[in-house]
Amino acid sequence: MHDHLDEPLPNHQHRYEGLDELPTLIVHRRREGLFLLFAGLFLGTLAMLNILGITRFIKLFELSGTDGEVMTIGGVPLVFAVAIGVLPYPLTFLCTDFISELYGRRRANLVVWIGLILNLWVVFILWIGGVLPGFEQRIGDEIIRDAADRMPVFYEVRSLAFGAVTASMIAYLVAQLVDVHVFHFWKRLTRGKHLWLRNNGSTLVSQLVDTTAVILITHYYAHALPISDNHPVLGQLMVFILTGYVFKLVMALLDTIPFMLGSRILARYLRLPPPGYDGAQVQ
C-alpha cells in the first residue's frame, strides 16, 4: 500500500470521500498506536508460544477407514496433532502482513528482528532462573527427581522451552523474513493489486518453511516429539509436518477475509491510500 513508510510516517493524508482531513497529531497518534498494537500482539504471542511451545501436543482428529481403523501412510497412523504453541502462531503472520501492508517492509522486518531479540531474552531468563540457587533437593549438582522420575515443574518447562525456543528461533527468523520478502514480491508483481494473493502467497510459503524447520529441529535437537518406536521415524516426522502445515494452511485461508477487510478499513482510519491505489499521494 505505502512503500515509503519505511521512514517515519509522512503527515500527508489520502482524501477519502465523506471523510474529513484530520489534524497531523491525530493522524500520527492513530498510525503509531495501531503499529504498537500489531507489534504488541506479534511479540506477546511469540513470547507465549515459546513458553507453552511443545509442553503438550493436541490431537485434533484422526482419519479412520470404513472399518473404523485409523488410516495409515507407510504404516504411520494419520493422526492430526499440533503442539499447543502452534495454536496462536498464525496470528503472528497476520500481524506482519498488516504491518507490511500499512507500514512497509522495513518496519515489518524491524518487528521480526525485535522478535528474535525477545526470543534470546526468554532464553536468558530461563537459563538464569535455573542457574540461581533455589530450594530443590540435590545430590551434588543433580536435582532429585520425584517418584515418576520427573524434574521440578520449572525444570521440566525449562527443558522443553529451550528446545522450543531453539527450534522456533531458527524457523521463525527464516519463515518471517520469507513471509515479508514474498509479500513484497507479490506486491511488486501485481503492482499493489490482488491483496488476497500476497496475503496467502506469503503466508503459505513461510508457514511451510516454518513447519518443516520446527518439526525437524524439535525432534533431532530437543527430542521432544511424541515419536513411537513402533513406526518409522521419517514417516512420523512427515505426518507431523503435514498435519501442522494443514492446520496453518486452514488458518491462513481463514484470515484472508479479515485481512482484506481490515486493510481497507484501517487505510481509511489511518488516511492512507487504499490497497491497489496507483495515484500520487496527497501532500
Image (cartoon, helix red, strand yellow):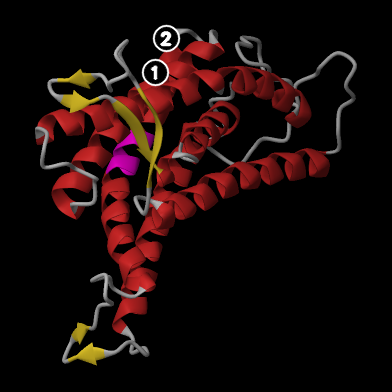
Q: Residue 183 sits in which quadrant?
A: top left
Give the number of the disc on residue 185: 1
Most common secondary structure along the magenta stretch: helix
Residue bearing the label numbered 2 = 189
Residue appearing at x 56%, y 26% in the figure: 101
Judge the density around disc 1: few (<14), some (14-19), many (≥20) Cα neighbours within 10 Å: some
Q: Secondary structure at mark 2?
A: helix
Are the residues tagged 2 and 1 within 8 Å (C-beta)? yes
Give the number of the disc on residue 137: none
Query: Residue 175 in magenta?
Result: yes
Q: Residue 226 sits in which quadrant?
A: top left
Query: Residue 49 in magenta?
Result: no
Measuring from the top left, give residue 150's x and y in whole percent: 27, 70
The C terminus appears in which quarter of the rendering? top right
Please give left or right for residue 10 compared with residue 61 in the image.
right
User: Going by the picture, which residue comes out furthest to the front?
Assistant: 67
Q: Amino acid at mark 1?
A: Phe
**Residue 91 higher or lower than 54, as above or below:** above
Please give left or right for residue 207 compared with residue 103 in the image.
left
Measuring from the top left, give residue 72's x and y in whole percent: 21, 21
**Residue 123 higher or lower than 239, as above or below:** below
Q: Which residues are magenta?
A: 171-176
